[in-house]
Amino acid sequence: MKKILLSVFVISLSICGCTHTVTRYSGENEIEFYSRVEKISKGQNDLLIETINKEKYKGRELKIDVDTTSFTDNSTNLIIIKKTQNISTITFPQMSKGAFDGFLFGSLIGGGIGLVGQLKDIGGSAPQGDVYFLLYSTLAGAAAGTIYGLINPSSIIIKIN
């Protein structure tokens, strides 16, 4: 039983920190897509911009249009301009989403582990120690999941070309 619970715990934690991929919708034209990309990446200071030639830049203040893409390089504070057709992906972390996902999965897993201790008491009132175990395991799962989510945040990957 412990091996099953441990495997469920590990699998659920591996779900935390998942990436979300943004691509162009089938009926969406380029201008609408690039406008959506700017809106999604607005205010992000840790953009990882990768070109089709495998050049990588850490930047902020992304401006993307049909023909050109510009951003401020974090290391040099210079504005870099590239052809949009040469941009492959734009990636950035989302700490709050990773922490929330970790909290959610950790709470569910911790509560599930605590609930297993009460299965023998179905139909009757649970002893007070089992209720505390349920509460503490839920809180421990939530804390562990939140910390894991902060360490391994979710990411958004925007596929341009």
Image (cartoon, grey):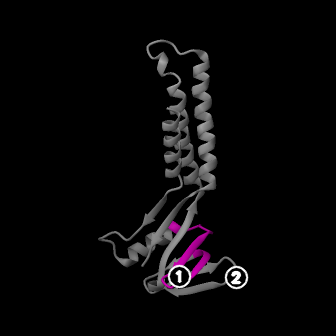
Any magenta on residue 118?
no
Query: Is residue 122 placed above or below 90 in the rendered structure?
Result: above
* Residue drawn at x 53%, y 87% as measured from the top left: 82
Secondary element type, mark 2: loop
Badge number at residue 159: none
- Please give the residue where the numbered disc 1 appears in the rendered image: 54
* Residue drawn at x 51%, y 21% as measured from the top left: 118
Secondary element type, mark 1: loop
Q: Could you say which is closer to the camera, residue 119 or residue 72?
A: 119
Mark 1 against mark 2, which lies toward the viewer? 1
* Residue drawn at x 53%, y 40% as measured from the top left: 6
Q: CB under 8 Å between callouts 1 and 2?
A: no
Query: Is residue 58 placed above or below 3 in the rendered structure?
Result: below
Any magenta on residue 57?
yes
Please give the range of residues in magenta.
40-61
- On the rendered image, what quadrant is the C terminus found in? bottom left
Type of amino acid at the residue the image marks with label 2: Thr
Q: Residue furthest left?
A: 27
Type of amino acid at the residue the image marks with label 1: Lys
* Residue drawn at x 53%, y 55% as measured from the top left: 17
Left or right of 108? Residue 66 is: left
Q: Could you say which is closer to the camera, residue 114 or residue 23?
A: 114
Other residues around mark 1 within 10 Å, as few (<14) / some (14–19) / many (≥20):
few
- Please give the residue where the numbered disc 2 appears in the rendered image: 76
In three-dimensional space, the C-alpha distance between marks 1 and 2, rounded to whole angstroms, equals 19 Å
- x%, y% of residue 84? 46, 84
- x%, y% of residue 158? 47, 70
Query: Is residue 76 placed above or below 124 in the rendered structure?
Result: below
